[in-house]
Image: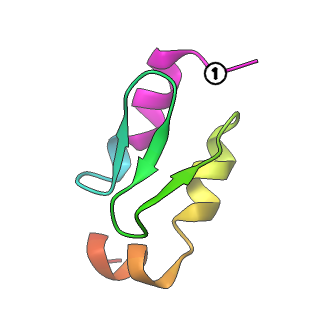
Amino acid sequence: MAPAKKSVQSWIQDYPNVFSYDGSVLFCSVCEKVVQCTKKFQVDQHDIHKDVKLTIGT
């Protein structure tokens, strides 16, 4: 079952200009890949990726 649109939008607020979500697909603009997410921790784990860290400045 797909996550609720509102939930995913709130999950990606901490990562401006990194993720985009169209209601069914979460896309990482840094990696240029679709990120599977049914839980928030999956978004956070993707943040571990070195390029994403460099982009958001953490």
Task: Please say whether residue 57 is visible from this viewpoint.
Answer: no
Task: Please say whether residue 52 is visible from this viewpoint.
Answer: yes
Look at 33% across and 59% down and name the residue there.
29
Q: Amino acid at mark 1?
A: Pro
The answer to whether 7 is drawn above or below residue 50 in the figure is above
Q: Is residue 39 left or right of residue 31?
A: right
Residue most toward the right?
1
Look at 53% across and 51% down and name the residue there.
34
Span of residues in magenta: 1-12
Secondary structure at badge 1 equals: loop
Q: Depth check: give the residue in front, 21 or 39.
A: 21
- State the predominant SS element of the stretch in magenta: helix
Q: Position of residue 7 (x, y in %)?
A: 52, 22
Q: Is residue 10 left or right of residue 3?
A: left
Q: Residue under label 1, please give it.
A: 3
Where on the picture, by quarter, is residue 44? bottom right
Residue most toward the left?
17
Q: Position of residue 28 (x, y in %)?
A: 42, 56
Q: Is residue 40 left or right of residue 47?
A: right
Q: Is residue 54 magenta?
A: no
Q: Position of residue 32 (x, y in %)?
A: 40, 63
The answer to whether 53 is drawn above or below residue 44 in the figure is below
Q: Depth check: give the residue in front, 26 or 14.
A: 26
Give the class, few, some or many, for how many residues have Cα within 10 Å of label 1's Cα (few <14, many ≥20): few
The N terminus, quarter of image: top right
Q: Is residue 8 magenta?
A: yes
Q: Position of residue 57 (x, y in %)?
A: 27, 77
Look at 34% across and 40% down and name the residue there.
13
